[in-house]
Image (spheres, grey):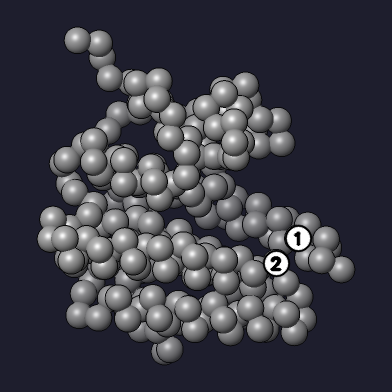
Amino acid sequence: MAEETVKLLGYWASPFALRVKWALKLKGIQYQYVEEDLPNKSPMLLQYNPVHKKVPVLVHDDKPLAESLIILEYIDEVWKQNPLLPIDPYERAKARFWAKFAEDKCGPAVMAAFSKKGEEKEKAAKEARENLKTLESGLEGKRFFGGETIGFVDIAAGWIGCWAQMTGEIIGIKLIDAETMPLLDAWFKDFLEVPFIKECMPPQDKLLEHNREFHKILTAAST
C-alpha cells in the first residue's frame, strides 16, 4: 500500500490556514507545509485551486480541497481520532450552526471594523460586538464550545478571538472584554493556553505589525 501523503498550502498570516493547522495538529497528522507567496501565486496553488486561487488548500494523496471549513470537516471524516464534531446528530448540527454563524457574521463584522474609518468603523464595531455576544451564548455552561475539550467550533472560530484582539489594539476599540463578554473572553484566553494551539500560532509581534500595515492599506483605499 502506498504511503499516505498530506500537504497544506498556506500563508503564515492567514487565519484560515491557521485553523487547518490546528485541526491537523489535534488529530496528530503529519503533513508537509508549503508557504505561499500570495502576490506571486505558485503554479502548485493555481493547479490545486484554479477557481479561487487562495489558501488554504489541503492535498491528501494528490486530491486537493479548498475552503477551510470544508477542509475541517474532511479532516474529521478521514481521521477519526480526537473527533472535532460531536457524535450526537443534534449536537453535531448545533456545532455546524455556530461555526457557520461565526464564519458568516462574526468574522466579516470584525474585518469590517478593521478596515473602516470614522462613523463606519464605529458602526461596524457595534455590529461586531453584537454578533460576538450572540456567539457567546453558545458557550453557556461550557469551557469550550466542544465542552471540556476543544471541538469543531473552537477550531473554526478561534482565529476570530485572535483577530478581534488585534483589531481592538489597532483601531482603539475593544471588541471582546471580560466585563461585557465574560464567557467569550475566558474561552479565548483558555483556548490560547492549549499547547497545540499555542504551538501553531505565528509570532504575535510579527502578526500585529503585519496587520498594522494591512490596516493602513485598507483604510487608505477607502478614502
- Closer to the chain start, of discs 2 and 1, is 2
Residue type beneath disc 1: Leu
Q: Residue at x 83, y 63 (%)?
A: 220
Instruction: Decide if residue 128 is in sight here.
Output: yes
Residue 117 vs residue 70: left or right? right
Residue 179 position within the rendered picture, expressed as x and y whole percent measured from the top left:
41, 89
User: Which image quadrant: the C terminus?
Assistant: bottom right
The image shows residue 170, relative to residue 133, as above or below, that is above
Residue type beneath disc 2: Ser
Residue 210 position within the rendered picture, expressed as x and y whole percent measured from the top left:
65, 52
User: Which image quadrant: the N terminus?
Assistant: top left
The residue identified by callout 1 is 218
- Looking at this rendering, what residue extends furthest in the left direction? 88
Q: Residue at x 31, y 41 (%)?
A: 74
* Helix, strand or loop under label 1: helix
Q: CA distance from mark 2 to mark 1?
A: 5 Å
Give the number of the disc on residue 115: 2
Q: Determine the image quadrant of residue 58.
A: top left
Instruction: Decide if residue 193 is in sight here.
Output: no
Q: Determine the image quadrant of residue 148.
A: bottom left
Given residues 181 and 204, the one toward you in this image is 181
Residue 142 position within the rendered picture, expressed as x and y whole percent measured from the top left:
21, 74
The crowding category of the residue bearing disc 2, from other C-alpha atoms within 10 Å (few below 14, some 14 to 19, many at least 20), is many
* Helix, strand or loop under label 2: helix
The image shows residue 197, relative to residue 174, as above or below, that is above
The crowding category of the residue bearing disc 1, from other C-alpha atoms within 10 Å (few below 14, some 14 to 19, many at least 20), is some
Given residues 18 and 48, the one toward you in this image is 48
Q: Are marks 2 and 1 in contact (CB under 8 Å)?
A: yes
Residue 51 vs residue 67: left or right? right
Q: Determine the image quadrant of residue 128.
A: bottom right
Q: Residue at x 25, y 11 (%)?
A: 2
